């Protein structure tokens, strides 16, 4: 607990320490509107993000930056002087959260890819904190940005300008503390980081109350989870936990020799996986549930179609197995969240998140479950569900209005009408 000692020496009280460890904060908290500003959103179908049945006709009151009332017409008093928003024919939802988005010194894509499409928060799993300096200083409205800092990798690292190369357990611990001191609200470990160093990073992260999420190719998911990892980025991270030992050996040997081999071989590895008769599957699901692991599958980047964009039939079949695996995890009760990975081969520019939602439907989730995945579940993954992720009294007012009924058809999620960020309307392009 070195960091505690250091802070105590600076004279902080025990109360301040508790606050520090509990709060998962965005690096760019949006400005708050005046506390006497009141907005009443009337007549929308309310989909509150918790997964239950929509409320067909609702009234939601926002005062300052907070939601202060939620109910049916007649139940909720409309304060004098409120800005009345008539939202009949629309659905009101919590602002969406993206578990996996990357940007570099850029204040444009967070707005055009995210905010304009109803995504009011995202996490970048693994780009250095400095990439987001412009986001902190701009006056333009930005989604809330949650960061992990530079990802922790082992040598030879794949992304030298984005990683911290870890050579010892002590260095792993030091890096985690330094990242959290500078604003990281989660830690990302990458696939060349060896297991002992993953464990050290997880121990340090636990001291600070932040989760560790992992992109894996060489280390097995169960080993990483036993070491303390609580999030898995990319469905492909599960390949080595589900394939036969011979095929796993072939895969890991090739990737260890040349990191870029993972790109070709992942789909090959998944084309060999049989989910029906798989002795590893049930123990894996049990472990994920017991340890409360969240999966951010980012399916859209792995989508392959036979004969299109050089996709082969074997790759398309492998992708079907990836989707089936996500479906099995969901059925078992493992939390699934929505991560766009910024861009995807079969999504228009800025629409990877929407493609990911469609693919989760193909995994067997229903629209309300997918919306819950992109709101409450992702907020839980970020450890901010006490203040964001649902439409409930007391929460900060990140809200979106879409035309139509996404509880019946998620196509409606492409019809964003209005976005409220921290109680302030965002100007959307025509
Ligand atoms: Zn990524």
Image (tube, grey):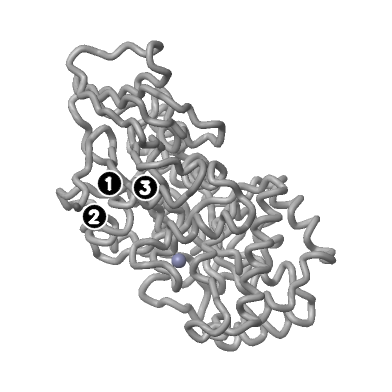
Q: Alpha-carbon distance for marks 1 and 2?
A: 7 Å
Taking the image as drawn, is residue 131 in sight? yes
Q: Which residue is mark 3?
A: 121
Of the numbered discs 1 and 2, the one sitting upstream in the chain is 1
Q: Are marks 3 and 2 in contact (CB under 8 Å)?
A: no
Identify the mark at residue 286; answer none if there is no mark.
none
Label 1: how many Cα within 10 Å (few below 14, some 14–19, many 20+): some
Of the numbered discs 3 and 2, the one sitting upstream in the chain is 3
On whether ligand 1 comes within 8 Å of the CB at mark 3, the answer is no
How many marks the image carries: the answer is 3
Identify the mark at residue 135; answer none if there is no mark.
2
Where residue 169 appears, x then y in whole percent? 56, 64
Where residue 403 appears, x then y in whole percent? 35, 42
Residue at far left of view: 139
Label 3: how many Cα within 10 Å (few below 14, some 14–19, many 20+): many
Q: Are marks 1 and 2 in contact (CB under 8 Å)?
A: yes
Q: Is residue 414 above or below residue 264?
A: above
Q: Alpha-carbon distance for marks 3 and 2?
A: 13 Å
Q: Alpha-carbon distance for marks 3 and 1?
A: 10 Å
Q: Nearer the viewer, residue 130 or 357?
A: 357
């Amino acid at each position: 607990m070195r960091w505690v000692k250091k802070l105590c020496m600076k004279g902080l009280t025990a109360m301040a320490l508790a606050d520090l460890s509990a709060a998962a904060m965005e690096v760019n908290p949006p400005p708050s509107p005046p506390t006497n500003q009141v907005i009443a959103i009337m007549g929308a179908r309310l989909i509150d993000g918790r997964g239950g049945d929509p409320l067909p006709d609702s009234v939601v009151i926002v005062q300052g930056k907070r939601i202060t009332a939620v109910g049916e017409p007649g139940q909720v008093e409309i304060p004098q002087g409120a800005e009345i928003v008539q939202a009949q024919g629309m659905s009101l939802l919590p602002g969406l959260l993206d578990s996996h988005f990357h940007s570099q010194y850029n204040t444009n894509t967070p707005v055009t890819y995210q905010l304009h499409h109803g995504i009011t928060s995202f996490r970048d799993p693994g780009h250095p904190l400095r990439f987001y300096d412009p986001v902190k200083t701009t006056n333009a409205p930005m989604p809330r940005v949650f960061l992990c800092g530079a990802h922790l990798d082992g040598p030879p690292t794949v992304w030298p300008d984005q990683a911290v190369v870890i050579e010892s357990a002590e260095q792993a611990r030091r890096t985690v503390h330094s990242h959290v001191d500078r604003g990281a609200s989660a830690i990302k470990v990458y696939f060349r980081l060896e297991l002992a160093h993953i464990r050290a990073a997880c121990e340090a992260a636990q001291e600070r109350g932040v989760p560790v999420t992992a992109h894996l190719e060489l280390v097995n998911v169960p080993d990483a989870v036993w070491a303390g990892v609580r999030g898995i980025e990319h469905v492909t991270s599960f390949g080595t936990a589900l394939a036969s030992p011979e095929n796993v050996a072939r895969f890991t040997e090739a990737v260890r020799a040349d990191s870029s081999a993972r790109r070709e071989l992942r789909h090959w590895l998944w084309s060999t996986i049989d989910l029906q008769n798989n002795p590893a599957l049930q123990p894996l699901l049990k472990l994920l549930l017991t340890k409360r692991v969240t999966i951010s599958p980012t399916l859209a980047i792995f989508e392959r179609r036979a004969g299109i964009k050089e996709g082969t039939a074997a790759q398309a079949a492998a992708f079907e197995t990836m989707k089936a695996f996500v479906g099995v995890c969901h059925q078992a009760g493992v939390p699934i969240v929505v991560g766009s990975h910024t861009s995807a081969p079969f999504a228009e520019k800025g629409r990877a998140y929407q493609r990911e939602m469609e693919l989760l439907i193909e995994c067997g989730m229903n629209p309300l479950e997918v919306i819950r995945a992109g709101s409450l579940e992702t907020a839980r993954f970020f450890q901010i569900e006490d203040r964001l992720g649902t439409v409930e009294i007391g929460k900060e007012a990140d809200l979106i209005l879409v035309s139509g009924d996404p509880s019946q058809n998620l196509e409606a999620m492409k019809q964003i009408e209005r976005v409220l960020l921290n109680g302030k309307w965002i100007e959307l392009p025509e």
